[in-house]
């Protein structure tokens, strides 16, 4: 099938490349001419394991193209995915300006039937507004057609940064929100090679599934973080408590990891948007507002731990291992490291940092941070080190070498990565999250 993807950001690019890899002919569109020129040469703007190889493979097989023109990309396309950004406004609402602009341009260039599919994360009832925008901007000849000339559908994404290709190719489920049998048939055909579990519903329900899923996962994280505070106060170990809970099949172990809080482009934005959607519908989603509060408090709690154990922060040199909001990505959006580093700098600390992939993005955020080429350079001469992102390479560090390089061997583990490493045997003072000083 010929498919157009409008928006070559994280979701659009991964979706387009994977659809091409399962046999479709895909054109990814973006208004950023420099990005498109680089993508044509298989130079990708993000770090995602395996993505570069798939782009090269499918360009070579002539199943994947890139363009700056919606008209060019959609001319022969049966399906057009909208995968543009929906950033948060100051009040928490999703800014749907790009979605509206794309819907209008699709309509103006339409000359035959198209299935327009929301891939961007949008609040419920957006599909109705997309449908209205397209209908109002259709060419005159199509407005007169007795047959439907377009359908709108919702197909939310559930991709995790760092494992997005695997998530797409081996989905837990594919959710499609449709209002016609024709739209359902086309979407089933698109995903047929994956043989997925299909959840078919109306557009409003599909849109809500995305926000509800991410908000529930954020809730589990905040529950674990709140639990870690109690564990510290009563001398319990949050890891053992979470393990004991996780064996209950009704609960599950996933996302019960205490740490310095969640970040990224999805959870913070989607929780805010869901809270706002609830308010507009007349419901005060107090639970989600508290989820958000706990996430912010967790960073403050970690800072208090550092200040308590380090005693004086001013003029101390602190090493930071990991800047991205999670491993296997270069994404710095809403990363906990941002608030933590800026707070320490405000207290007069000097920061040295290392991240395997996120350094260039971090340079656009922080001032006066010394970026290092490896973990050992980052901890050299430091009064303490913070582990903020659980990259695989950090699991294999030479702690004797680290201890020798540091001025004071104090390690604050913001992800409980080293919970069973017994770092005390290497001469470290070790502090995790919710370990009850064990």
Image (spheres, grey):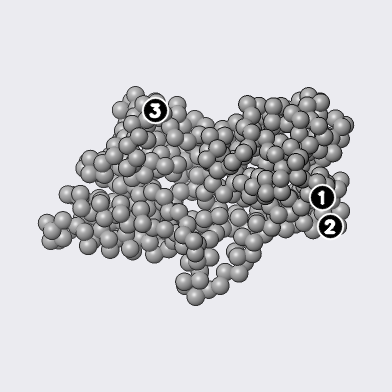
Q: Are marks 3 and 2 in contact (CB under 8 Å)?
A: no
- The answer to whether residue 84 of the structure is visible from this angle is yes
Ranked by sequence position, the earlier of labels 1 and 2 is 2
Q: Which residue is mark 2?
A: 233
Q: Choose top left, top right, bottom left or bottom right for residue 62.
A: top left
Ranked by sequence position, the earlier of labels 3 and 1 is 3
Task: In this rendered view, identify the residue nearer to me: 384 or 148.
Answer: 384
Tell me where residue 312 appears, x and y as whole percent.
Answer: 80, 46
Q: Which mark is residue 38?
A: none
Q: Which residue is mark 1?
A: 308
Query: Can you say which quadrant of the picture contains the N terminus?
Result: top left
Q: Are marks 3 and 1 in contact (CB under 8 Å)?
A: no
Task: In this rendered view, identify the residue nearer to me: 1 or 295.
Answer: 295
Residue 327 located left or right of residue 419: left
- In the depicted structure, whether residue 375 falls above or below residue 174: above
State the SS at label 2.
Answer: helix
Task: In this rendered view, identify the residue nearer to me: 89 or 247.
Answer: 89
Instruction: Point out the frontmost of discs 1 and 2.
Output: 1
- The answer to whether residue 245 of the structure is visible from this angle is no
Residue beneath the point at 57% across and 49% down: 334
Ranked by sequence position, the earlier of labels 3 and 2 is 3
Q: CA distance from mark 3 to mark 2?
A: 52 Å
Tell me where residue 122 appears, x and y as whole percent.
Answer: 43, 57
Residue beneath the point at 59% across and 58% down: 216
Task: In this rendered view, identify the residue nearer to me: 21 or 282.
Answer: 282
Q: Residues within 10 Å of mark 1 (few under 14, many from 20)?
A: few
State the SS at label 1.
Answer: helix
Residue beneath the point at 16% across and 56% down: 139
Q: Which residue is mark 3?
A: 42
């Amino acid at each position: 099938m010929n498919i157009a993807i409008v928006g070559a950001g994280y979701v659009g690019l991964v979706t387009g490349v994977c659809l091409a890899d399962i046999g479709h002919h895909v054109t990814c569109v973006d208004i950023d001419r420099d990005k498109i020129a680089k993508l044509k040469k298989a130079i990708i703007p993000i770090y995602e394991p395996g993505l570069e190889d798939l782009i090269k493979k499918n360009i070579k097989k002539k199943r994947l193209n890139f363009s700056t023109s919606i008209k060019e990309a959609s001319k022969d396309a049966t399906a057009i995915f909208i995968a543009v950004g929906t950033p948060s406004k100051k009040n928490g609402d999703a800014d749907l300006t790009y979605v509206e602009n794309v819907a209008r341009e699709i309509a103006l260039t339409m000359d035959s039937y198209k299935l327009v599919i929301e891939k961007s994360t949008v609040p419920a009832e957006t599909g109705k507004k997309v449908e209205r925008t397209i209908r109002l901007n259709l060419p005159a000849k199509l407005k007169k057609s007795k047959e439907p000339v377009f359908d709108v559908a919702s197909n939310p994404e559930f991709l995790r940064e760092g494992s997005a290709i695997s998530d797409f190719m081996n989905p837990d489920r594919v959710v499609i929100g449709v209002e016609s049998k024709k739209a359902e048939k086309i979407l089933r055909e698109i995903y047929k090679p994956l043989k997925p579990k299909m959840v078919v519903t109306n557009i409003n329900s599909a849109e809500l599934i995305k926000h509800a899923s991410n908000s529930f996962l954020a809730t589990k994280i905040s529950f674990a973080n709140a639990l870690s505070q109690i564990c510290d106060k009563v001398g319990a170990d949050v890891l053992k408590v979470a393990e004991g809970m996780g064996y209950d099949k009704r609960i599950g172990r996933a996302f019960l990891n205490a740490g310095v809080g969640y970040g990224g482009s999805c959870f913070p934005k989607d929780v805010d948007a869901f809270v706002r959607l609830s308010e507009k519908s007349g419901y005060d989603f107090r639970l989600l507002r508290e989820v958000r509060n706990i996430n912010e408090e967790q960073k403050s709690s970690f800072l208090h731990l550092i200040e308590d154990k380090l005693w004086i922060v001013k003029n101390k040199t602190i090493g930071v291992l990991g800047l991205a909001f999670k491993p296997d990505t270069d994404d710095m959006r809403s990363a906990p490291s941002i608030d933590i580093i800026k707070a320490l700098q405000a207290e007069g600390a000097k920061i040295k940092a290392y991240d395997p992939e996120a350094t260039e993005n971090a340079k656009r955020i922080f001032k006066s941070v010394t970026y290092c080429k490896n973990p050992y350079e980052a901890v050299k001469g430091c009064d303490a080190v913070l582990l903020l992102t659980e990259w695989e390479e950090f699991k294999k560090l030479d702690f004797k070498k680290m201890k020798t390089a540091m001025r004071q061997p104090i390690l604050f583990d913001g992800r409980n990565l080293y919970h069973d490493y017994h770092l005390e045997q290497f001469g470290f003072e070790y502090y995790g999250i919710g370990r009850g000083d064990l």
